[in-house]
Image (cartoon, grey):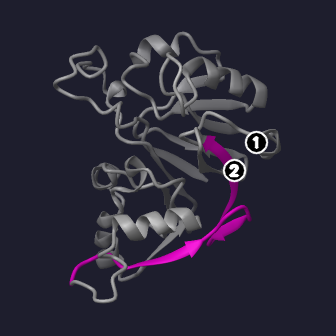
């Protein structure tokens, strides 16, 4: 199974001309972070977890011509805003797009993209089929996903485990029962927003401590704000089995 980091940033992490900070003005390509999302693929199947505002750019950059499904972690705009762009795959692949979400996220999609789900369809809008999941293990062709329940302040968010790989974004709390699902991992991807305390995200230090507790063989940090700092400097602070992910990074798990 191969995982591609489509984006490793946040809406706070997208380079802004007006910001002027070291990250936003950095010449290092590793500091240019689009909104967080990953692509998981096998020889037969290719799925995207979250389609944020940069979804179209990410698909073009990686030259992706076919995906089999979109899976959502939660309903915040930096994770769902690109849903409209799946219409290109409807056209290219002559298929309706399966979309997997919890009931709460489904309700949000229907509010945010009412035209997609309207009784009277406007020509050229995306064609999607919604599939609801909650806590049960489910599969998309030969990719088996185990949902992991985490909290984003007071908002429930889903992480996912596939084989010995796990992906968790937008979290600042993982219950002990859910940590049990994160044992014996080869790779853990975890959010690390910034150094300063945040109401709904793990800080850099909190993410490091969580990795030490869960003990995966390897960990990558994602959902990185420009407030955290420069990639090259941050990586020097991390233990050997941890590093910041970068946009476009591919790993085999």
Within 10 angstroms of label 2, few (less than 14), some, or many (20 or more) residues? many
Q: Nearer the viewer, mark 1 or mark 2?
A: 2
- Residue at position x 31%, y 30% from top? 32
Q: Which residues are magenta?
A: 123-151
Q: Can you tell which mark lies on residue 74?
A: none
Residue occupying image coordinates x 49% and y 31%: 245
Q: Residue 238: x and y, percent? A: 59, 15
Residue 245 to residue 27: above or below: below
Mark 2 and mark 1 in contact (Cβ < 8 Å)? yes
Q: Earlier in the sequence, mark 1 or mark 2?
A: 2
x and y percentages locating residue 126 in the rendered image? 32, 75
In the picture of the structure, the residue carrying the numbered disc 2 is 148
Cα–Cα span, label 1 and label 2:
8 Å
Q: Name the quarter where the C terminus is drawn.
A: top right
Residue placed furthest toward the front: 154
Say whether residue 71 is magenta.
no
Q: In the displayed structure, would residue 113 be above or below residue 21?
A: below
Q: Nearer the viewer, residue 95 or 132?
A: 132
Return the residue nearer the eye: 65 or 116. 116
Residue at the image point whose x is 58% and y is 64% from the top: 102
Residue annotated with mark 1? 182
Horizontal relation, residue 38 to residue 210: left or right: left
Q: Secondary structure at mark 1?
A: helix
Identify the element where label 2 is drawn. strand
On the question of residue 26 being in view, the answer is: yes
Residue 142 visible to the viewer: no
Residue that protrudes farthest toward the bottom in the picture: 120
- Image side of residue 172 versus residue 72, left or right: right
Residue 155 is situated, as x and y percent measured from the top left of the image, at 57, 47
């Amino acid at each position: 199974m191969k995982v591609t980091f489509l984006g490793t940033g946040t809406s706070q992490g997208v380079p802004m001309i007006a910001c002027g900070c070291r990250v936003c003005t950095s010449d290092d390509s590793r500091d240019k972070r689009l909104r967080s999302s990953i692509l998981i693929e096998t020889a037969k199947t290719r799925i995207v977890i979250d389609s944020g505002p940069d979804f179209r750019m990410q698909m073009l950059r990686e030259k992706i011509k076919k995906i089999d499904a979109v899976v959502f972690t939660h309903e915040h705009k930096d994770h769902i805003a690109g849903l409209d762009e799946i219409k290109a795959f409807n056209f290219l692949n002559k298929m309706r797009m399966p979309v997997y979400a919890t009931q709460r996220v489904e309700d949000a999609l229907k509010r945010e993209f009412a035209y997609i789900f309207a009784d009277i369809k406007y020509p050229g809008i995306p064609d999607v089929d919604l599939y609801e999941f909650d806590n049960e293990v489910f599969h998309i062709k030969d990719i088996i996903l185990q949902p992991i329940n985490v909290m984003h302040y007071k908002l429930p968010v889903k992480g996912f485990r596939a084989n010995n790989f796990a992906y968790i974004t937008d979290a600042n709390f993982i219950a002990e029962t859910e940590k049990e699902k994160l044992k014996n991992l080869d790779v853990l991807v975890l959010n690390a927003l910034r150094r300063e305390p945040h109401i709904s995200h793990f800080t850099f230090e909190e993410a490091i401590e969580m990795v030490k507790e869960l003990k995966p063989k390897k960990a990558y940090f994602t959902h990185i704000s420009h407030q955290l700092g420069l990639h090259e400097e941050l990586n020097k602070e991390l233990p050997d089995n941890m590093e910041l992910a970068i946009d476009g990074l591919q790993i085999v798990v």
